[in-house]
Image (cartoon, rainbow, N blue to C red):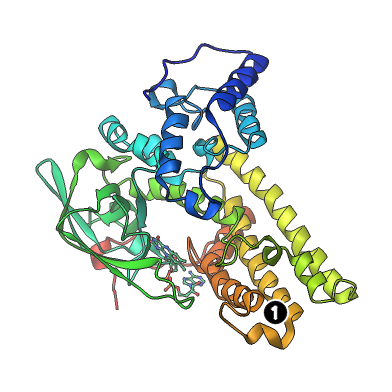
Amino acid sequence: MTLIPPPKAMSDDELRSEVRAWLKDNWKGLPVSQDQWTSSPERRAWMEKVVDARWAVNRWPVEWFGRGLSDPQAKIVEEEFRAARALGAGLDKSQLYAITALAFGTDVMKNHVLKGILTGNVNMCLLYSEPGAGSDLAGVRTRAVRDGDDFVVNGQKVWTSGAMTADYGMLIARTDWDVPKHNGISFFFLPMKQKGVEVRPLRQVTDESHFNEVFFTDARVPAEFLLGGLNNGWRVLQTALAYERSVMGDGARGPRRGDDKASTDMIALAREAGKLNDPLVRQDLAKVLSYRKLNALNNARAKADLATGTSSPIMSLGKLAMSRILHEEARLRTTLLGAGSMLEGDAHPRADDANFLALNAYFTSIGGGTDQIQRNIIGERVLGLPKEPEVDRTIPFKDVRAG
Ligand SMILES: Cc1cc2nc3c(=O)[nH]c(=O)nc-3n(C[C@H](O)[C@H](O)[C@H](O)COP(=O)(O)OP(=O)(O)OC[C@H]3O[C@@H](n4cnc5c(N)ncnc54)[C@H](O)[C@@H]3O)c2cc1C
């Protein structure tokens, strides 16, 4: 398949008919199970078709796989995809890496990676956190130094999800040590499959290994893969982080075994435990279910802000709320299962799920910025409270004391 020519402007009805007809001709339902789909060749083949037909990123300009549609028209396309239970539309609102590349990348870089990110042929990771810079990302010490047409990168990242399989990483590195910390950072798409990049997996409390340490020793990144200009990385990062928070605020992983609907359904679990008529359990159920609903509405509001080009602090509210919801749900699951919740393993699937979800709830309360940091953002940027004192904000970074 190749990209179809730029489409002509259409009425809402014409657009709806076109997308419906295209889906009827092309989408025959999931060819493999939901679990296998995410990393399957079938998914990549399908996404090639969706991107080439310009349905994946409708709001984007025609020169970058889009149709330049207004938000209401793009929603028509997404509605039709949903109605057909087809996947792949709406990436212009959810694909963090592609959104960042489109907003800040050079044309050379976009030509190189954008389609692959949209189709899933290019895997990505986030190279932000370091042993000495997590909540305070402006304190990164990984350095990038210009050398001809490239930058040369040295340093270390940590907690990098998906680094083992990533083709590129969104990297923040220090490019100027003589200015205050926020002003000397640049943002790159770093090629991961090269000699100067070493990835070492870390083991998590859930016994999984999703994240890694990443070491750079004279790793190279082309200057054309610098986003947003030299020393302007902090601004690029703020937009990328806001999108990440919105994704984390929208939802979180279900149980490890995945396809067991009843175990994800709190009401079914309460019924199974014979506690559905318990007034306290009902109160708790109503609380967590209404938190989820409210949070979905708040996130829709925040996404509308982002679509207008503002990096919305309301994203922090959604992410913080999701963190609280996951911990509340974990507590309620444990209450419903009673002492049985201490069991583990395949013979005790409900308890195993409850344990996994309780431990995994920390994913959302730490990853993408901790709960405390979200509270700071809400305090300062939503409620207008005075800023936290920052003694190192205005001095050259080379003079900042580090332990
Ligand atoms: C599941 C998961 C996936 C992740 N994936 C990635 C990834 O792909 N790429 C990546 O770069 N990073 C990733 N991270 C790292 C994550 O972003 C950091 O762990 C997080 O930002 C916190 O940084 P830190 O661990 O260095 O803790 P620190 O910043 O050292 O914080 C320690 C404690 O101090 C508190 N604290 C710190 N500063 C303040 C303050 N100013 N006010 C109040 N309290 C404060 C924190 O809330 C926390 O409780 C991931 C983390 C998790 C859990």
Instruction: Determine the quadrant in which ligand 1 lies.
Output: bottom left
Mark 1 Cα-neighbour bin, 10 Å: few <14, some 14–19, many ≥20: some
In the rendered structure, which amino acid carries the disc numbered 1? Thr
Residue at the spot 64% in from the left edge and 56% down from the top edge: 383
Residue 254, percent from left and from top:
60, 62
Question: Circle 1 is placed at which residue position?
Answer: 334
Does mark 1 have its CB less than 8 Å from ligand 1?
no
Q: Residue at x 26, y 44 (%)?
A: 230
Q: Position of residue 175 (x, y in %)?
A: 22, 53
Left or right: where 61 falls relative to 295: left
How far across and down, in percent of the image, does residue 378 sit? Answer: 60, 58
Kindly identify the residue that appears in the image at 69 percent across and 85 percent down. Answer: 340
For residue 282, above or below residue 125: below
The structure residue drawn at horizontal position 46% and vertical position 36%, both measured from the top left corner, is 46
- Left of 246 or right of it: where is 270? right
- How many dots with numbers? 1
